[in-house]
Image: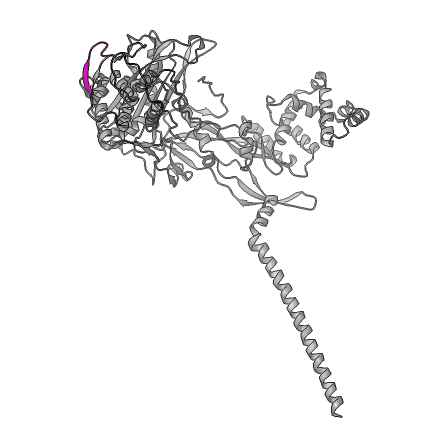
Amino acid sequence: MRKPIQKKRNMKAKQRASLTFRMNVLFFSIFLMFSILIFRLGYLQIVKGEDYVRKLESTEEVKVNTSVPRGRIYDRYGRILVDNKPENAITYTKLPTTKTAEMIEVAEDLAQLIDMPTNRVTYRDKQDFWILKNNDAAKAKVTDEEMKEFRLANEDIEEKEVNAEYDRRVRERITEEELAQLTDFDLEVLAIYREMTSGYDLSPQIIKSENVTNEEFALVSERLTELPGVNTITDWKRVRLASLAVLGRTTTPSKGIPKSKLNYYLAREYSRNDRVGESYFEAQYEELLQGEKSVVKNLTNKQGEVVETITTYEGEPGKDLVTTIDMELQQQAEQIVEKYLLQMKAGGSSSLLDRAFYVMMEPNTGEILSMVGKKIEYDEDTGERYLVDYSYGTFTTAYEAGSTVKAATVLTAYSEGVITPGTVLVDQPIKLAGTATKSSIFNRGGAIAMNDLRALEQSSNSYMFQLAIKMGGSNYYPNMGLRVKDDTLQRMRNGYAQFGLGVNTGIDLPGEMGGYQGVMDTPGKLLDLAIGQFDTYTPLQLAQYISTVANGGYRIQPRMLKDIRKPSSDGETLGTLVEEVKPKILNRISNTDKEIEHVQEGLRRVYVGSNGSARSKFYNTPYTAAGKTGTAEVVYYGPQKEKYGTNTLNLVHVGYAPFENPEVAYAVVIPWATTNFSNYTSYNNHIAREILDVYFELKEKRASNGTLTSTVEQPILPTLSEEVLNEDEEEQKVNE
């Protein structure tokens, strides 16, 4: 009996063991499946979560143009230079399900309510619209047999190419008489329709924002329920309250993004009709000024119709920018430059004269205080002359600077080791074999021993010529044949470049040029380089150069941006400071402090020394200052092509003040001032003195009334001019 019972027990044990094993396998499988599931969910949420969110947002969330105000632009004391003017606007938003016929119907209704300009309607637009209005007639212009023959003749052609050929044939067969059937009303409808189709689905497009009358605005507003997709909003227009051209311009809604930068801005989620900075300061700081569009999420039904729109981000206006410009100083400097430019033009021997420039900057920070450029233009109808702002010419045009570069020549000679501070040379006419005699203006035939200080004071050409010869590896003697080391020219240019001469200054404005370098076809051209009559430099380069000398040898990047601020909350004080721009040192010149101080003393003697070339205008200043004058004999290659090759003079002046602790550095350039080399007035010195006087007068006035810049709380000051320049006004053309 025990064996069967034992056998039965063993069988039950085996069954239990088998069941336990199967249960364990089952539970392990379930555990493994759940682990895989949890791991997958974790991977999707943690690793790929952001990607899927972005993908979802890209399909549901759309940035829309809500006409966010562009940031204001102020001068350093809080005066508004560029502002926004509110104006009425009419917009249209196309839904993904909107049909062409529905859009045309809305356009026809709108055309009855508003006066729409048709000047932007193109010939192709007219063709497209005629096809839409006369679809059957358009189809009849190209037969099926004709296109069948085309396909047979081009067996490998793709269908899109067939459609393009069909479209081309239809268009070329539309006659002028048929297009003439489009009435004035049809053209207004077309003008509205083309704006409707210029953007993307769910993105509001401005139909009309310029010159929308109150009556038009009211009529459209009353019928919004009858005009699906149409809305009335308050838009804005960019207005410039200062004529300063370097502030730049923005495009108008009708122009939108310039074609040359279309892909650039579209990649940054701009709309085609967005207004963007088109030039100079507005273009340079577009991303700060533009602001952030609002973001909306559109909820659709099964038919693709938008049933609800939810705003997920309200957007924000552009940042306000405080420039370094002192507008009060700028205005008075412009008046002084204009006065002397017109005075010179009215005199004799001034047929080539048409422009003058002035730049003032802080030598220790690079902040541009004033940037003046004036150019004479002529009215083609009346023949009368008028002045245009040419401030951008201070960094986009270059001229020979004459003796103003001699401080750089001396300092370069120091660093090259050919002289030391105090070295004495004989000022004498320089006669090289096979060349005409070169001399200083004050010494045409004698011999005057002088050191480097006197050479700067009297503006000795001969001294500088001999420095160039020394840097070439020789010492001067009469009738010598000039042979220089191959790298001499480049070493001299490298020396000048340390000061910013012949290289870009780094100004925070687009379009800067570095100047033109002459071709050294003879070794004697090296001598011309040493006195500033070979290479050309911009007025801004000259200001940076003298700033480098003034501040002890540091080349500072010039800039127009001082502060970045949030929009003003009350309209009375500037907004909260976001960022204060810091000075940027580009390089330190390769001279010792002793060498720089020695040259500074030479520049001081130019103003107050008994033989100083600027003594007559600066010996009696109530402040201390230093500088260098320049008169460059040049050959004219300006805008008057018929006068190419005429010999003329450039009048130049650079300086800084106060001498002991420089606050400002400045440069005056008057190209092609006169063709009379023997009898002219140094108006460059007049301009330099008068504007410097204005600076110190304003400084004293502000010290007495407490008008100072502040990084904490700064009041918004009224504009100095009643002139208002709208963005849609035609810009005056200036030929460089």
Magenta-tinted stretch: 442-450
Toward the right, the furthest residue is 145
Q: Position of residue 48 (x, y in %)?
A: 58, 52
Q: Is residue 479 above or below residue 260?
A: above
Residue 212 seen by the camera:
no
Quarter of the image for residue 542 reads top left
Residue 700 lies within the magenta run: no
Quarter of the image for residue 186 reads top right
Left or right: where does residue 41 sit relative to residue 711? right
Q: Main secondary structure of the magenta part?
A: loop
Where, quadrant-wise, is the N terminus in this rendering? bottom right
Residue 446 lies within the magenta run: yes
Residue 560 seen by the camera:
yes
Toward the bottom, the furthest residue is 1
Q: Position of residue 51 (x, y in %)?
A: 57, 49
Q: Is residue 1 above or below residue 512?
A: below
Where, quadrant-wise, is the C terminus in this rendering? top left
Q: Nearer the viewer, residue 542 or 476?
A: 476
